[in-house]
Image (cartoon, rainbow, N blue to C red):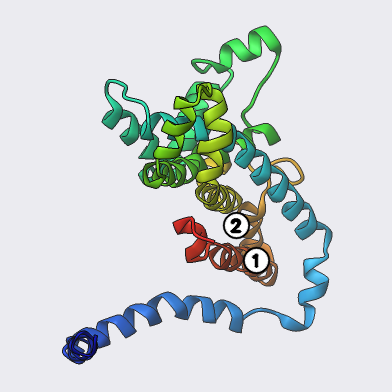
Amino acid sequence: MRATSARRRVARRRRPVILVLPAVLALAFLITPLIGLLARTPWPTLTDRLFSAEVGQALRLSLICATLATAICIVLGIPLAWLLARAHVPGQGIIRALVTVPLVLPPVVGGVALLLVFGRRGLLGQYLYNWFGVSLPFTTPGVVVAEAFVAMPFLVISVEGALRAADSRYEEAAATLGASPWYIFRRVTLPSVLPGVIAGAVLCWARALGEFGATITFAGNFPGKTTTMPLAVYLALETDPDAAIVLSLVLLTVSVVVLVSLRERWIRGSV
């Protein structure tokens, strides 16, 4: 034991010092803009601006749309994650690649793709409009659809990872005792990966809350209807920079809270 500790101390001392300077520069590069945001925040009028009608309207719309988008992602994303982790289907690698496309796809391109599919003349949108009179673009439901499209991969990847790491022996034991597949999923599989589901849902919600490109392209920017917090920041930068800073501070606070909530014990599934 002592020999092992000694070797670890020696290894720590031998870490290359030359890497310290680039590491400090990288940390400064990431933190300095946040410090600049805090330094320019209009603290004396912060409370009044936070409770203004414009901020409240954008925040309320953002919270509602992000929550609805997360609910859609949970309902559709958990089965998709199970399919990727447990089922053996042809082209599984291609399916996984397609699922992760929104992570690397520019959000504006995602918005254009949604318009081509769900627009009034889109592949599916023409039938939604002609048969049911439903038009998603430039509406509040359109915001929810755009946010769900961008945010779902975060939940799918998190839940798939949790499913692959889960011990399948409990599921095999339940099947041996005669439990149905649906019962095993509800009472054994899902509880065992619940921390991964929570982590994925929180990440999904945070990503939906901060979505900008797909939202403005597919849903537009109409105050009280489709203007979420990121879009409100974009508008305020042109007319009221202090309001834009306050809105940015709110989104920064949400991001910090999300990162704090996703502690290592949630991500790894330990308690």
Crowding around mark 1 (Cα neighbors within 10 Å: few <14, some 14 to 19, many 20+) is: many
Which tag, 1 or 2, sits closer to the chain's start? 2
Crowding around mark 2 (Cα neighbors within 10 Å: few <14, some 14 to 19, many 20+) is: some
Task: Residue 87: name its quadrant.
Answer: top left
Q: Horizontally, is 17 left or right of 53 in the view?
A: left
Q: Where does the image place residue 21, in percent across and percent down from the top left?
A: 26, 87
Q: Where does the image place residue 205, in percent across and percent down from the top left?
A: 59, 49
Work out which quarter of the rendered image holds the C terminus and state it: bottom right
65 w.r.t. 267: above or below: above
Residue at point 52%, 59% (across, down): 266
51 w.r.t. 200: above or below: below
Q: Horizontally, is 104 left or right of 128 in the view?
A: left
**SS at badge 1:** helix
Q: Nearer the viewer, residue 19 or 240?
A: 19
Q: Where does the image place residue 72, in percent across and percent down from the top left?
A: 61, 34
Any part of residue 146 in sight: no
212 w.r.t. 251: above or below: above
Q: Horizontally, is 20 left or right of 173 in the view?
A: left
Q: Where does the image place residue 129, in percent across and percent down from the top left?
A: 65, 14
Q: Say which mark, if any, is on residue 234.
A: 2
Amino acid type, label 2: Tyr
Q: Nearer the viewer, residue 136 or 80?
A: 80
Which residue is denoted by mark 1 in the rendering?
Answer: 244
Structural distance between the alpha carbons of marks 1 and 2: 7 Å
Q: Are marks 1 and 2 in contact (CB under 8 Å)?
A: yes
Residue at point 57%, 17% (across, down): 125
Work out which quarter of the rendered image holds the N terminus and state it: bottom left
